Amino acid sequence: MAYQSTNPYDGKVVKIFEEISDKQLEDKLKSASNCFETVWRQKTFAERKAVLARAAAIMREQSQALAELITLEMGKLIQQSQGEVALSAAILDYYAEHAEVFLAPEKLKTAKGEAMVESSPIGVLFGVEPWNYPYYQIARFAAPNLMAGNVVMVKHASNVPQCALAFERVLKEAGAPEGAYTNLFISKDQISHVIDDPRIRAVALTGSEGAGAVVAARAGKNLKKATLELGGSDPFIVLEDADLEKAVKYAVRGRMGNAGQACTASKRIIVVEALADSFLKKFQAAMEGFKPGDPMDKQTTLAPLSSAEALKILLGQVDEAVSNGARVLIGGKRIEGQVGAFMQPTILTDIKAGNPAYKKEFFGPVALFFRVADENAAVALANDSPFGLGGSVFTQDIERGKKVAQKIETGMVFINSDLVSSPELPFGGVKNSGYGRELSGAGIQEFVNKKLIRVS
């Protein structure tokens, strides 16, 4: 696969990077394994903390340059890229500060003698990461595991190679020893080789269902643990007692953040009939107000999609939905007059259960709008999906919102908000959205050995 920076705004190729050779890959595997055994696992929490805290500081010092790389390579609005840099630095700081407490030995009550569970690192970990949040995705994988004493190797997405190199450079500048964090420009065949290698102890992937199935199967064949964060088609439920203005505001933000290219985007807008007309009128007006342009310009509010191929896929999904009975309320086409891969903000309605769009994930600025009779119908529709990542419920009755949230089959539910990510909140899903958790105390527990020590 080619590792290539192509500016989504103008389609120009910026830089190309060659895949490494098998010999170079072997050298990097040896370096990572040696670093784990002789250097990194031996360091104290305080020593690891110094490296991650310094890395967080460097990210903040270099925020503008790092943010511009995101926007250059995958097209994110520059202000959102700056937010991603800040969040990534916060994740590094969070685990630097809390890892020792999260992994503290746990004393167990036992009828006789003493017993405790200790947490120890398991070794070299391999991560396969996506392009849509180039720093955040690797920060939430690398930070907890480096603090746990593991070392990590990362195969980043092929269209954000400069971001991949920048994150590796930040950790090296912060004092991470050679082999503690390794970026890999490798082929698909080499990915399989890395997963098979006995020095790799576990695998993490954030990506598509297809990629998750392949990686999980390969890891399972080698009896290695894997965590998967896959796609989502998050329901955004608006009940009849919701604050209408607030619900519309967060529906727009939840659907249009990162040009709609987020697994946790609010993709299915489900509104109870009593509020549906009023909501849809305001939602449509807000969706029509986006301004396409250069994502480096802070006046731009609509960014391009990450690539021409991404736009082609999304347009095909819209056409398929319409041919199966859906109606385009607004949008549905490419924005003319723009060189880059710009999609009109789109609202699809009248989507029936037999329509392929009913079950699919739309990765871009396309909202699926559903009107339902009542709360029970909203929950039923929310759960009628192969995905189970996140969701939202809007109501002014918080206790009611909590009860509805309990019925939704997802890993995360937000009441009166779209889904947001924060270091202290566990992130992950169920069903075809994957398994395992990242962030919070849960994120650091995935790849450690919980060893029982019993004294009689």
Image (spheres, rainbow, N blue to C red):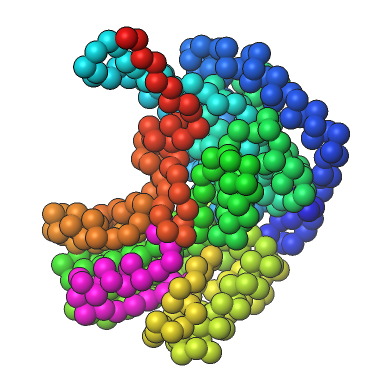
Residue 379: which quarter of the image?
Answer: bottom left
Q: Is residue 221 left or right of residue 253?
A: right
Q: Is residue 178 above or below residue 6?
A: above
Residue drawn at the location 60% of the way across and 60% of the way down = 210
Compared with 108, 152 (above or below) is below
Which residue is pictured at 74% across the width and 55% down the height? 6
User: Quadrant of residue 104 in the image?
Assistant: top left
Report the quarter where the C terminus lies. top left
Instruction: Give coordinates of residue 86: x percent, y percent.
Output: 49, 37
Residue 126 percent location from the top left of the image: 63, 37
Of 242 and 380, the residue lying toward us = 380
User: What's the residue at 80%, 32% (across, down)?
Assistant: 26
Residue 449 percent coordinates (x, y): 48, 26
Position of 241 relative to 154 (above/below): below
Residue 407 placement (x, y as % from top left): 24, 60
Most foreground residue, 66 or 136: 136
41 left or right of 17 in image: left
Stretch of the chain drawn in magenta: 365-389
Query: Residue at left 29%, top 60%?
Result: 408
Magenta span includes 385: yes
Residue 123 visible in rendering: yes
Q: Is 264 included in the stretch rendered in magenta?
A: no
Q: Is residue 89 visible?
A: no
